[in-house]
Image (cartoon, grey):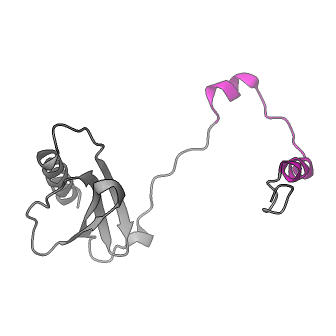
Amino acid sequence: VTEDCSAVACALVEAAIESADPKTSRLITLRLRLSGDYLVVELEAARFTMPPTSPDLRTGELQLGNGVKLIWCELPLPTGVNANAVPLPRREKRRSPAAEALGDEPDVDPELIQRILFGLGGSMGNGPGR
């Protein structure tokens, strides 16, 4: 899947660059997403022409706002693997260097935080100013 995904992503980015208007600079966004039995490669770009792809790949495009298109290509996951079976990487919970320099976190009363939030109008959407 890695080689196929890399080839598709490279083809989409290359096509986006070749289709781009050299007089305007636009951002190109490339995303990988798991959905059901597929790894979906998505690319957002302006002025995009879909490159030729393998006939067994599902592809499509969607016009977004501001002249930007969302182009997608679905790569089938290996047999017996689906989006729920693929564990995504998780970041380790860690404190920032600034927080580390402060030492241990102080004990905070959750009820005090709720009262502060209520006073600021952020408690369940029914505080003052709502």
In the image, residue 9 sits, relative to residue 63, either above or below, namely: above
Relative horizontal placement of residue 7, taking residue 61 as reference (left or right): left
* Residue drawn where x is 36% and y is 62% of the image: 33
Q: Nearer the viewer, residue 79 or 68?
A: 68
Magenta-drawn stretch contains 63: no
Relative horizontal placement of residue 25, taking residue 90 as reference (left or right): left
Q: Nearer the viewer, residue 24 or 90?
A: 24
Q: Residue 43: give x, y in percent of width and height.
A: 27, 56
In the image, residue 27 sits, relative to residue 111, either above or below, namely: above
> What stretch of residues is rendered in magenta?
95-120
Is most of the magenta stretch helix, strand or loop?
A: helix
Q: Quadrant of the N terminus?
A: bottom left
Relative horizontal placement of residue 71, taking residue 97 as reference (left or right): left
Q: Residue 118: give x, y in percent of width and height.
A: 87, 53
Q: Residue 95: give x, y in percent of width and height.
A: 65, 35
Relative horizontal placement of residue 8, taking residue 118 as reference (left or right): left
- The answer to which quarter of the image holds residue 67 is bottom left
* Residue drawn where x is 17% and y is 57% of the image: 8
Q: Nearer the viewer, residue 106 or 18?
A: 18
- The answer to which quarter of the image holds residue 96 is top right
